[in-house]
Amino acid sequence: MTSAPMIVVLCTVPDEATGERLARMLVGDRLAACVNILGGVRSIYRWRGAIEDAGEALLVIKTRRELFEPLCARLVDAHPYDVPEVVALPVDAVHEAYARWLVDETVPPGGARP
């Protein structure tokens, strides 16, 4: 295990098709190394004064810490929600080979590859 140069970003979407579109965009743009799409998520939340109950999918996005801002901007711009959930969680430790793979599959701001 090694200290992690990465974060995990959570983002809910209205359905798996939207999740796939956004996942392919983020991985294609090299802002994320991997995106898991978890279907069957049920969200209960307050929106515009009412309690809502909606079926959604959850994106679990693995990326570099330094890519959060460009990833967030790209995701918010392409997301169908007015206020999309984009929440980054720190990773305290990660398998070293996975961390190397993640770094190799993403491009830092400015486009320079390691």
Image (cartoon, helix red, strand yellow):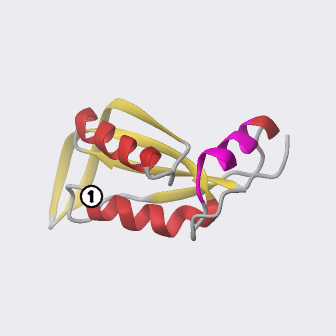
Q: Residue at x 31, y 40 (%)?
A: 19
Q: Residue furthest right?
A: 1
* Relative depth, front residue between 46 and 106: 106
Q: Is residue 100 left or right of residue 16?
A: right
Q: Is residue 26 left or right of residue 100?
A: left
Image coords of residue 70 (percent x, y): 47, 67
Q: Is residue 114 left or right of residue 87?
A: right
Image coords of residue 47 (percent x, y): 19, 62
Q: Indicate yes or no whether the magenta region holds residue 96.
A: no
The type of residue carrying mark 1 is: Ala
Q: Residue at x 34, y 47 (%)?
A: 12
Q: Residue at x 39, y 50 (%)?
A: 11
Image coords of residue 65 (percent x, y): 63, 61
**Label 1 Cα neighbours within 10 Å, binned few <14 / some 14-19 / many ≥20:** some
In this picture, is 40 found above or below 78?
above
Residue placed under numbered mark 1 in the picture: 78
Magenta region, mostly helix, strand or loop?
A: helix
Element under disc 1: helix
In the picture, the quarter occupied by the N terminus is top right
Q: Please state the extent of the stretch shown in magenta in the rendering.
A: 98-107
Image coords of residue 27 (percent x, y): 46, 45
